[in-house]
Amino acid sequence: MTHNLFTRARGAARRGAHGGLALLAVAFAMPASADDLIDVQVDQAKIIQLPEKTATVIIGNPIIADVTLLKGNNKMVLTGKGFGETNLIALDSGGNSLGESTIRVKTGFNGLTVQRGLDRESYSCAPKCQPTVVLGDTTKFAGDTAGQIQAHSALATSGSAPGAK
């Protein structure tokens, strides 16, 4: 399912320039509507429909979200990278703004969190609880878990298991 983006910008463009400054002041004073807000979970992707003639897409903070433009269909893939909010701006080939939206990256974690004082560990429990890496975990736990995941992946792609001949 695609998310339609920039509906307020298109509506304002259709209304024309009459009362432009007053309209602009009202638009900035209003909180973002549901049409201007795109929710995505961290480590998940979503297909987004862009305005017609979009040539450039700008992400305010690429640590929070990333985009990949899909060729020829005014769509992009939005991926949640880190928790928080940032903005997304679409420009035409002349550098004119076609619209702007807020991207909110939230947790979609459905597991177990173990808190030991300031130290935090996360476990994915689908179906059996196993260590996983989630933003905010203790550095040592996250590093050890990521190392195990990388070692497992390397073994799986090499086609050999430890001790195999």
Image (tube, rainbow, N blue to C red):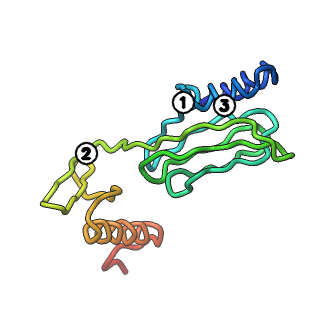
Q: Secondary structure at mark 2?
A: strand
Give the label, 2 or 3, closer to the camera: 3
Task: Please report whichever mark, 3 or 1, sits nearer to the chain's N-terminal start.
Answer: 3
Residue tagged 1 = 32
Image point 26% across, 65% down: which residue? 138
| Quadrant occupied by the C terminus | bottom left
Query: 24 or 56, which is in the foreground?
Result: 24
Image point 75% across, 36% down: which residue? 98
Give the label, 3 or 1, closer to the camera: 1
Q: CA distance from mark 3 to mark 1?
A: 11 Å
The correct choice, above or below, for 89 with respect to 138 in the image is above
Image point 45% across, 44% down: which residue? 105
Q: Which amino acid lies under the numbered mark 3 shown in the image of this protein? A: Phe
Query: 64 or 72, which is in the foreground?
Result: 64
Graded by Cα atoms within 10 Å as few (under 14), some (14 to 19) or many (20 or more), the crowding at tag 2 reads some
Does residue 140 appear left or right of residue 96 in this picture?
left
Residue that lies at the very extreme toward the left in this rendered image: 117
Q: CA distance from mark 2 to mark 3?
A: 34 Å
Residue tagged 3 = 6
Which disc is residue 111 wearing?
2
Does residue 115 appear left or right of residue 91 in this picture?
left
